[in-house]
Image: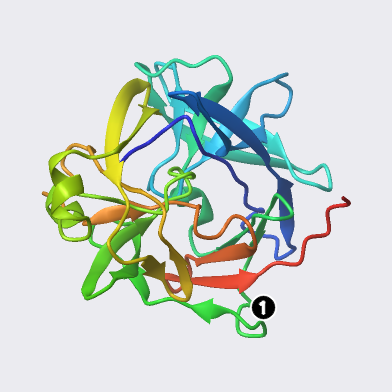
């Protein structure tokens, strides 16, 4: 899956506590081919380390610390100043200046993670309130790879094995090439009119894309923005058809990842941020 240094973050509360934990996150922009993407990365500040951050990645089933030879514990603070702690696996070949680790879904085992995009807030709880809210639950399930999958439609095409990945923030959708060819025009398939350069796990790659013939939709959220060919090694062999990022939701929604029963839902968010 396309992992860019675009995207990442989050927190959980103690396994013995049932209080809600709230973690603010920060957008980081990036530029590619003269275009600036303001919501490129979701960053959470590391406790005790100035200008060091983690990246939230629901497309990663494990958490990683970069540039270390052994597993490492990293701390970060919640909104009420309590320290959150997690053990990260080592990724010694990955080196970055600001983002020192990837926080994956292992951190949220048997919990609910709510990403409130308009209020730039991450919320972790024990899922007690998920049945009390007007949540639109998507057709979703846990795949054999450990990823949470959602269904994506584009005209008559339906894809069931799509990872909902906060680590692909700017993309409404990327697809394996054979699936991408099903949703773009024959002319664009021969000469893709869009391209973007991203950092995928420390390596810069260029993705090619085109507008879909029909809007791509996850639940009731739809987009006609460009979709790109995914170059993640082994994606097709694993049975994953593509990856959906934050772009369908980050202007107005919350995404609820329920890791207790392996479902995903969306909810309209009311922004509390002052103009």
Report the front residue among 91 and 220.
220
Report the front residue among 108 and 140.
140
Q: Is residue 79 left or right of residue 192?
A: right
Is residue 269 something that shows in the picture?
yes
Which type of secondary structure does the marked residue at label 1 adopt? Answer: loop
Residue depicted at 88% across the width and 52% down the height: 274
- Quadrant in the picture for residue 76: top right
What residue does disc 1 label?
A: 129
Report the front residue among 19 and 190.
190
Q: Position of residue 215 (x, y in %)?
A: 36, 66
Q: Position of residue 124 (x, y in %)?
A: 64, 59
Report the front residue among 149 and 103.
149
Residue depicted at 36% across the width and 53% down the height: 173
Is residue 239 something that shows in the picture?
no
Q: Position of residue 125 (x, y in %)?
A: 65, 64
- Quadrant in the picture for residue 192: top left
- Quadrant in the picture for residue 268: bottom right
Q: Position of residue 68 (x, y in %)?
A: 44, 17
């Amino acid at each position: 899956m396309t992992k860019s240094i675009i995207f990442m973050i989050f927190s959980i509360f103690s396994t013995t506590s049932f209080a809600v934990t709230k973690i603010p996150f920060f957008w980081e922009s990036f530029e590619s081919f003269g275009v600036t993407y303001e919501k490129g990365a979701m960053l959470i500040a590391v406790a005790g380390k100035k200008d060091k951050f983690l990246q939230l990645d629901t497309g990663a089933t494990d958490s990683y610390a970069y540039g270390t030879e052994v597993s490492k514990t990293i701390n970060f603070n919640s909104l009420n100043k309590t320290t959150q702690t997690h053990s990260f696996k080592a990724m010694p070949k990955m080196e970055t200046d600001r983002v020192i680790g990837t926080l994956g879904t292992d951190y949220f085992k048997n919990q609910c993670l709510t990403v409130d995009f308009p209020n730039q807030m991450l919320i972790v709880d024990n899922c007690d309130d998920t049945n009390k809210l007007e949540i639109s639950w998507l057709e979703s399930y846990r795949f054999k790879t450990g990823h949470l999958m959602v269904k994506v439609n584009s005209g008559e095409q339906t894809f069931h094995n799509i990872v909902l990945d906060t680590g692909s923030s700017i993309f409404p959708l990327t697809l394996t090439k054979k699936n991408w060819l099903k949703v773009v025009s024959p002319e664009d398939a021969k000469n893709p009119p869009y391209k973007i350069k991203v950092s995928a796990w420390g390596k810069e790659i260029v993705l090619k894309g085109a507008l879909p013939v029909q809007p791509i939709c996850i639940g009731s959220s739809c987009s006609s923005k460009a979709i790109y060919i995914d170059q993640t090694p082994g994606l097709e062999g694993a049975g994953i058809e593509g990856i959906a990022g934050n772009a369908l939701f980050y202007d107005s929604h919350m995404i609820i990842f329920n890791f207790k029963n392996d479902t995903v839902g969306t909810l309209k968010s009311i922004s509390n941020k002052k103009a």
